[in-house]
Image: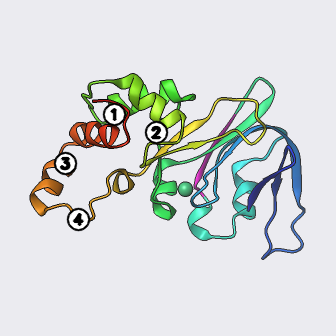
Amino acid sequence: MIEIKNGRIYFYNTLKPDLMVLDFKCLSAYVCPACKNVLRAYFVGSIIPESLKEYMEKDTMKYAYEMGNTQGAQWLALRDHSHKECCRWEVVGAMSKGIENSVKSFIEIHNIKIKDTQALMTAIGTDKMPGFKRVFDETGADLPMLLFKESDLLNTAGMTFEKKWELLRDLSKTIDSVLRSIGMHN
Ligand SMILES: [Zn+2]
């Protein structure tokens, strides 16, 4: 398991009591609020892929992280497809940080054509936009990341099948309609 607590990153495995607990000073870390997995971490220390594997309690997580070194510290990042296997929220734009950059990536990735990008950024930045979640850096050092879950975007309760179909096949239209419904644009 990987856990972030009080500015430190811990590696431990409750199934292997003989395995030494590792802990390092954490410079930056993001934890998914939905599945509680560490999405990204940057820390002063070193762990090699072979030993990280030992700390993973679930077999499916043994190769779930990418890692590397930069400027004397180590980073690790949960692979998108590994996150998808255990969570319904997806990280928007793996390398984007901050709401503005993440929204720009989101628009590019999904080929979105909405009327007012700024309104979407404002709605996300004030937690008014369903389907999007900000994830803050645990150490407070870096800008937030962004998560997206399409099925949370639209409350389809009480909507006719035709209306639902019209909106769901067109993400741009859906986002415009949600922005309107929360009073972010006309
Ligand atoms: Zn998650």
Q: CA distance from mark 4 to mark 3?
A: 14 Å
What secondary structure do most residues of the magenta stretch adopt?
A: strand
Question: What's under tag 4, amino acid-wise?
Answer: Gly
Q: CA distance from mark 1 to mark 3?
A: 18 Å
Question: What's under tag 2, amino acid-wise?
Answer: Val
**Which residue is label 1 attached to?**
109
- Badge 3 marks a residue whose secondary structure is helix
Query: Can residue 106 be seen at all in this image of the molecule?
Result: yes
Under 8 Å from ligand 1: the CB of mark 1?
A: no
Tag 2 and tag 1, C-beta contact below 8 Å: yes
Name the quadrant containing residue 53. bottom right
Sequence-earlier tag: 2 or 3: 2
Sequence-earlier tag: 2 or 1: 2
- Looking at the rendering, the quadrant in which ligand 1 lies is bottom right
Q: Magenta stretch containing residue 67, yes or no?
A: yes
Crowd tier of the residue under label 1, counting other residues whose Cα lies within 10 Å: few below 14, some 14–19, many 20 or above: few
Sequence-earlier tag: 1 or 3: 1
Q: Position of residue 186 (x, y in %)?
A: 27, 30
Sequence-earlier tag: 4 or 2: 2
Q: Is residue 60 above or below residue 106?
A: below
Residue appearing at x 26%, y 25% in the figure: 115
**Which residue is label 4 attached to?**
158
Q: CA distance from mark 4 to mark 2?
A: 29 Å
Tag 4 and tag 3, C-beta contact below 8 Å: no
Q: Is residue 174 above or below residue 70?
A: below
